[in-house]
Image (tube, rainbow, N blue to C red):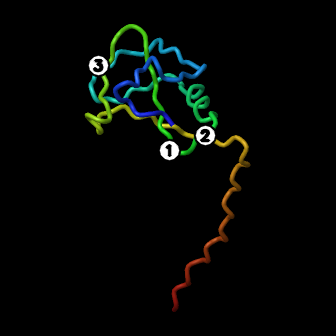
């Protein structure tokens, strides 16, 4: 579980993953507040959740470095505008779900009486 960002907890002192992701060919963010897709971060996320002591709802932090610039909001200052990471988990070892049972055909409507 990543410690909170506070005084004395410099980014340079944080544990890092061996996995990394290159952010090349990412178009400029021209619309503040618009959604933008990142490259595939699954290798980094997988390394984090594979660590001893990882549990559901632990915090994750990402260090993004390089040249250029992007503007993003922090959750503490602008919760509704802050970046959001959506993670979808697929359990590759669970057998596929069985198809739903088929329903019997509906009975025919009643015949009109004479």
Whichever of callouts 2 and 3 sits on the residue coming sooner in the sequence is 3
Quarter of the rendering containing residue 82: top left
Q: For numbered disc 1, what is the local secondary structure?
A: loop
Whichever of callouts 1 and 3 sits on the residue coming sooner in the sequence is 3
Quarter of the rendering containing residue 89: top right
| Residue at 33% in and 17% down | 70
Please say if the residues under marks 2 and 1 sit with CB atoms less than 8 Å apart: no
Using the image, tell me which numbered label, if any, was put on residue 105: none
| Residue labelled with disc 1 | 57
Using the image, tell me which numbered label, if any, was put on residue 30: 3
Location of residue 78 in the rendering, given as x and y in whole percent from the top left corner = 26, 35
| Residue labelled with disc 2 | 53
Q: Nearer the viewer, residue 76 or 71?
A: 76
Q: CA distance from mark 2 to mark 1?
A: 12 Å
Looking at this view, name the residue that lies furthest to the front: 8
**Local crowd size for mark 3, using a 10 Å CA cut-off: few (<14), some (14–19), many (≥20):** few
Task: Look at discs 2 and 3 and give the one toward the viewer.
Answer: 2
Q: For numbered disc 2, what is the local secondary structure?
A: loop
Location of residue 38 in the rendering, given as x and y in whole percent from the top left corner = 46, 24
**Local crowd size for mark 1, using a 10 Å CA cut-off: few (<14), some (14–19), many (≥20):** few
């Amino acid at each position: 579980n990543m410690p909170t960002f506070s005084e004395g907890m410099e980014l340079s002192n944080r544990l890092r993953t061996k996995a990394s992701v290159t952010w090349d060919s990412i178009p400029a963010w021209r619309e503040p507040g618009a959604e933008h897709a990142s490259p595939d971060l699954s290798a980094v996320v997988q390394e984090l959740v594979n660590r001893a002591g990882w549990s559901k709802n632990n915090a994750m932090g990402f260090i993004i470095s390089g040249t250029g610039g992007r503007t993003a909001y922090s959750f503490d200052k602008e919760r509704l505008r802050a970046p959001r990471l959506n993670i979808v988990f697929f359990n590759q070892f669970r057998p596929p779900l069985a198809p739903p049972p088929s329903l019997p055909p509906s009975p025919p409507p009643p015949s009109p009486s004479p």
